[in-house]
Image (cartoon, rainbow, N blue to C red):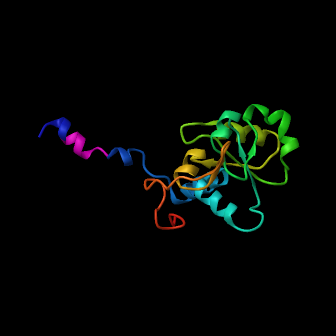
Amino acid sequence: MTTSTARARTAPHPVLRVPPASPERAAAHFAASLAFHTDASDVAAALADDGDPGFVVVDCRSTESWDQGHLPSAVHLPTALIPEQADRLLDRSVPVVTYCWGPGCNGAARAALALAERGYRVKEMLGGFEYWAREGFPYETFEGPARRDPDPLTAPLDAQHCGC
């Protein structure tokens, strides 16, 4: 056995090259993450319940993107317009959930930052509009209501939610 082969076998696997955090640090990290993020499935469940979900959803994309598809109850507030329109469209006492296109776009994070800097309590919806549509939740377009079949890679086909 060569020295490099022996070294390769005794070196930690890349997953554990940096050891996991202590349970206390991990709990603090994940609690903080959940304070800043939600996902399409949780938003859909809250919006499907009768009554007030306790938050407002903000689509921070362009008008062209909004017309292609948006959450039925969303408020359209492009990020660039937040300074001049947020106070007219939103109530600071109601938490805000922002979304943009999807996981490859940081527009929802930019909108969340702009709203937080103006005193709003805000979370970002992970997955954005892409995962909303891919998970089979209803949406609206300039042509009217729409819905796609759930993508089996993102949502269970025979259940209301993934159970996580």
Q: Is residue 60 visible?
A: yes
In which quarter of the view is residue 81 placed?
Answer: top right
Residue 160 place in picture, x, y as percent:
54, 67
Instruction: Examine the structure image and report whether residue 161 is included in the region drawn in magenta.
Output: no
Is residue 48 left or right of 24 when viewed as pictured? right
Residue 73 place in picture, x, y as percent:
73, 53
Q: Residue at x 23, y 45 (%)?
A: 9
Q: Residue at x 47, y 62 (%)?
A: 156
Residue reaching furthest to the right? 88
Q: Residue at x 62, y 60 (%)?
A: 42
Is residue 160 left or right of 124 when viewed as pictured? left
Residue range of the region highlighted in magenta in the rendering: 6-12
Residue 155 place in picture, x, y as percent:
49, 58
Is residue 153 left or right of 10 when viewed as pictured? right
Q: Residue at x 58, y 58 (%)?
A: 41
Q: How many marks?
A: 0
- Tell me the quarter of the image containing the N terminus: top left
Residue 130 place in picture, x, y as percent:
56, 45
